Amino acid sequence: MCFDRQFAIIIGIPIVIIIEIVRFIKCKKSKIKFINLREMAVIIFSVYIIGLISVTLFPFDTYRNVKPTANLVPVFNTIKDISGIPADMKGFMTKIWIVNISGNLFLLTPLAILVPIIFKKFRNIKPIVLLCLFASVLIETLQYLSMLLGNIRSVDIDDVILNTLGSIIGFYIFNYFQKLANLSGFRKKL
């Protein structure tokens, strides 16, 4: 049985649409303005979560004899793997490593930008980094559990480190735009 990335999107997008319609009706009845920066961030956040799930947990296919493994040694194994690439594969494998490292670095950056817009208590670096660290560990744990069911995934402490570094980048992007919005008088209150 195989669940691919489209499965997450086919199920997720209608759920988001239904939730947003319900929220819109609720705001209409309460005569609250529905579309503002926070509400747009909630919609973008919902779509981002669907994308995050589809990238980190799908495709989900069950194979026999998959032995769950996890790299719990930070950085060392990644450097060893990169330095051990055969000469005839360097160009190809370098591209794969660049995509892997940059993908993990920026995977949770949108989370660190959107969550502080939606929730005021995440407008300091410590809570947002802790949230993203928790999210990253949760993703790696779910990937490990999916290996127990026969799915071929990769569990790596370096992913957690890169995801967390990406959350710091995301928080500083949020902080920069918040200061810019304050200086320009663009917003009353974010």
Image (cartoon, helix red, strand yellow):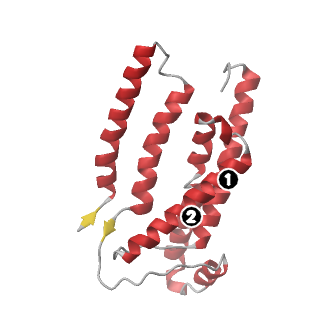
Quadrant where the C terminus sits is top right
Residue 160 % position (x, y): 60, 65
Neighbor class of circle 2 (other Cα within 10 Å; few <14, some 14-19, many 20+) is many
Where residue 137 is drawn, which disc sits there? 2
Image coords of residue 114 (percent x, y): 58, 40
Report the quarter where the N terminus lies.
Answer: bottom left
Determine whether the residue tagged by mark 2 lies in a helix, strand or loop.
helix
Residue at (34% x, 46% y) in the render: 12
Q: Amino acid at mark 2?
A: Val
Sequence order check, earlier mark of 1 and 2? 1
Q: Label 1 crowding class (10 Å Cα cut-off): few <14, some 14-19, many 20+? A: many
Q: What residue did someone put label 1 on?
A: 129
Location of residue 82 (image quadrant) = bottom right
At label 1, the amino acid type is Val
Instruction: Check disc 1 and report its element: helix, strand or loop.
Output: helix
Q: Up-down: is 108 above or below 58?
A: above
Q: Position of residue 135 (x, y in %)?
A: 55, 57
Quarter of the figure with residue 17 = top left
